[in-house]
Amino acid sequence: MNHILPVIENGHIHFGENKVQEAIEKWTEIKNGNKKIKLHMVGKLQTNKVKYALRVFDFIHSLDNLKLASKLSEEQKKYLKKPKIFIQVNIGNEKQKSGINKNDLVEFYNECIKLNLDIIGTMCLPPINIKKDTFFSEMKKINDSLKLKDLSMGMSDDYLEAIKYSATYLRIGSKIFGKRN
């Protein structure tokens, strides 16, 4: 945690975490002391962790199924907290990755709106070892077609490409803090 404090002291307010329990342990006290900090859930969120996630996260980048959408809707009413949410799109149609199939996206988005979720954009994790331009370009088109402002894509290795396609949120952890243990 000591490596994050200097970044906060220099004015950075947006941070991402992959795991709910880790985030609660690391960020609860810091967020209580600095209300400007915005915490982003960038990892897979399980429905049984939603009530804990809403305690600490302001953004969720990984909405990937209707069961999770329903649970978020239910829990945000209890906590009177409405996180900003990105729908995760399985842009490469990879079996091992979660996310909404792009062909089902409009219907899923409309269901999320009915559930009173604050959908601000889409997110993707394109296939590795393949040129990302095609996927980033397609995500930009998808986002534009849904008239969504924010686009979460690009990581330490490909963030410059993602910016070319209007990414508004980037996940650049290892370039700043080094690889995870």
Image (cartoon, rainbow, N blue to C red):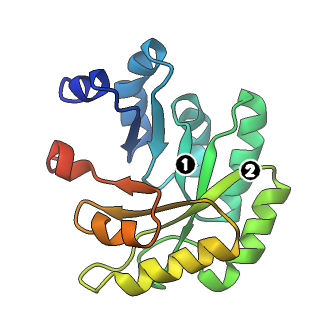
Q: Is residue 95 visible?
A: no
Residue type at tag 1? Ile
Residue 1 sits in quarter: top left
Q: Secondary structure at mark 2?
A: loop
Residue 135: percent from left, percent from top: 43, 82
Task: Name which residue lies at 80% across and 64% down.
Answer: 111
Task: Name which residue lies at 25% across and 23% down.
Answer: 5
Q: Secondary structure at mark 1?
A: strand
Residue 152: percent from left, percent from top: 47, 60
Instruction: Look at the picture and state if 117 lies above or below 79.
Output: below
Residue type at tag 2? Leu
Task: In the rendered structure, find residue 117 and report the number of the disc placed on it.
Answer: 2
Crowding near pointer 2: few (<14 within 10 Å), some, many (20+)? Answer: many
Residues under labels 2 and 1: Cα distance?
11 Å
Which residue is tagged 1? 60
Residue 161: percent from left, percent from top: 32, 72
Instruction: Look at the picture and state if 14 lies above or below 31.
Output: below
